[in-house]
Amino acid sequence: MKFAELLNPRAVKAVSSTSSKKRLMHDIADIAESAYGIPADRSVDALMERENLGPTGVGHGVALPHARLDCVGSVVGVFMLLEKPIDFNSVDRQPVDIVFALFAPEDAGVEHLKALALVSRTLRDPEFCTKLRANPDPATLHTIITEGATLAA
């Protein structure tokens, strides 16, 4: 699995501010609807339901919210770089400024896990995250993720 298969260029955004974790979930859902046609209301519900099981803030300013939906045809992602980090109840209690959300079909099984592993492994690299944080342009971010991540992973 490659990032280019997961991430539509229209699903990459740099956001100057978002007020809360819940607002961020709505922003993610809006982007997913625009880029992939996933109904925003269903996305928000699924993301929040998953968050209620346990926060998806994995530490070092990174969050990996994810959800399974029956209206999704393949595993897809939304990437957001936040100018102002927000509290995400992360494992290390640090605020989050890098968010990579994944949406998978209900029956995705191993594909969902492969995508989650790829994203997690890549965003654990401090140099990679530094490069992302230094480039707020969505087109540049998409290029870094889809081309640079292949080399890093």
Image (spheres, rainbow, N blue to C red):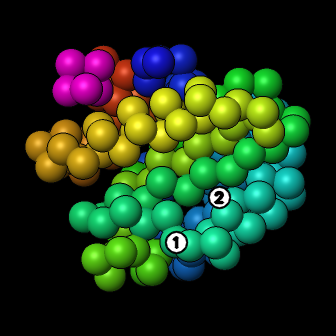
Q: Position of residue 51 (x, y in %)?
A: 62, 69
**Quadrant in which residue 110 is drawn:** top right
Rendered residue at 44%/24% (across/down)? 3
In this figure, which residue is indicated by the disc labeled 2? 27
Which range is magenta? 148-153
Rendered residue at 87%/36% (across/down)? 71
Q: Position of residue 62 (x, y in %)?
A: 35, 59
Residue 9 makes an appearance in the image: yes
Q: Is residue 117 above or below residue 29?
A: above
Q: Amino acid at mark 1?
A: Pro
Tag of residue 55: 1
Q: In the depicted view, which residue is nearer to us: 140 or 115?
A: 115
Say which of marks 1 and 2 sits in front: 1
Task: Please rate how many residues cluster around mark 1, counting C-alpha atoms within 10 Å: few if below 14, some from 14 to 19, many from 20.
Answer: some
Residue 83 makes an appearance in the image: no
Q: Is residue 149 magenta?
A: yes
Chief SS of the magenta region: helix
Q: Is residue 20 above or below residue 2?
A: below
Pointer 1 or 2: first along the chain = 2
Asked if disc 1 and disc 2 are in contact, CB closer than 8 Å, the reply is no
**Quadrant in which residue 49 is drawn:** bottom right
